[in-house]
Image (spheres, rainbow, N blue to C red):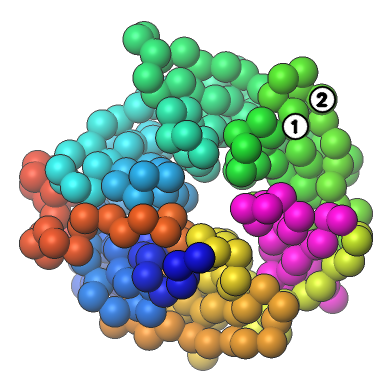
Amino acid sequence: MAGAFSSEILYITVTQQDSGRVYRLNVADADGQRVRTVLQSREPILSASWAPDGERIAYVSFERDSRPAIYVHNLKTRTRQQVTDFEGLNGAPAFSPDGKKLAMVLSKDGNPEIYVLDLESKPRKLRRLTRHYGIDTEPSWSADGQSIIFTSNRGGQPQIYSMRLSDLEIERLTFEGDYNARSSLTRDGKGLVMVHRRNGIFHISHLDLDRGRFSVLTETALDESPSIAPNDSMLIYATMVDGQGILAGVSMDGSVKFNLPAREGDVREPAWSPLKKTLFSSVKQSLPTGVESATNPN
């Protein structure tokens, strides 16, 4: 299998200027080099994720009337489309393994719930998956596209659940500790990576679903947003060092740890690309047509 460092990463930086904060969505090589800005805005950018083709990304932007909306952005053509504009929360977009659907969190019916939007149907069909008074959020997909993994406090504390899409049957996956969130499955479906709170400190952890073995992988504090490499060998996450947000990496067994350089600002919410290289590296280092004028922070 191709090495993880032949892929790319998405991440968000936040810089403080005299006139206020500037948010940037960036693409870089997996070692943190050759940084290219996709989008910049005075309003927050959140929850960037890759499509399986490595050419599209989805993210949340607050650029329109300071309200959250989900966008699908083509890195090759530098075009994008707004795909949601519901009242309330529009968040946490995640592409299905075939790239045809987008899982997301919407609160348009009063409570944060998991939905799936069919990107290819006309008009686009929206399917509601969860119906619970608790908060359901942070969806991700199993590799076969048959299940959704999500975070819910329906049991009183944030834990990880799996929902089978064929019959919407739900199974709780985590029981270790009082906080587990922001999870994703390894490609083989045998491992679950998540943010886990232990002694009041947030770390990145791994659960072996076959053996039930739970391992804490990181030793830094305020660790968040883990993203698994396309060959399951390691993961990247956001953390704090000397008061600044940076990206760090750790092997899946916890034996190898490293930090990635950041040019400026606090770095947040990394996402590792699929193995197929995007064509974005051949594109000039500039913002998408029409985006800079709409969100120019100057």
Residue at image mark 1: 163
Q: Is residue 255 above or below residue 209?
A: below
Q: Is residue 96 above or below residue 214?
A: above
- For the residues labelled 1 and 2, the Cα–Cα distance comes to 5 Å
Residue contact between numbered discs 1 and 2, judged by CB atoms under 8 Å = yes
Amino acid tagged 2: Glu
Q: Is residue 254 above or below residue 94?
A: below
Report whether residue 234 is seen.
yes
Circle 2 — which element?
strand
In the rendered structure, which segment of residues is drawn in magenta? 185-210
Amino acid tagged 1: Met
Asked whether, in this view, residue 240 is left or right of residue 179, the answer is left
Residue at image mark 2: 169
User: Main structural element of the magenta stretch: helix, strand or loop?
Assistant: strand
Q: Earlier in the sequence, mark 1 or mark 2?
A: 1
Residue sitting at the far top: 123
Residue 62, magenta (yes or no): no
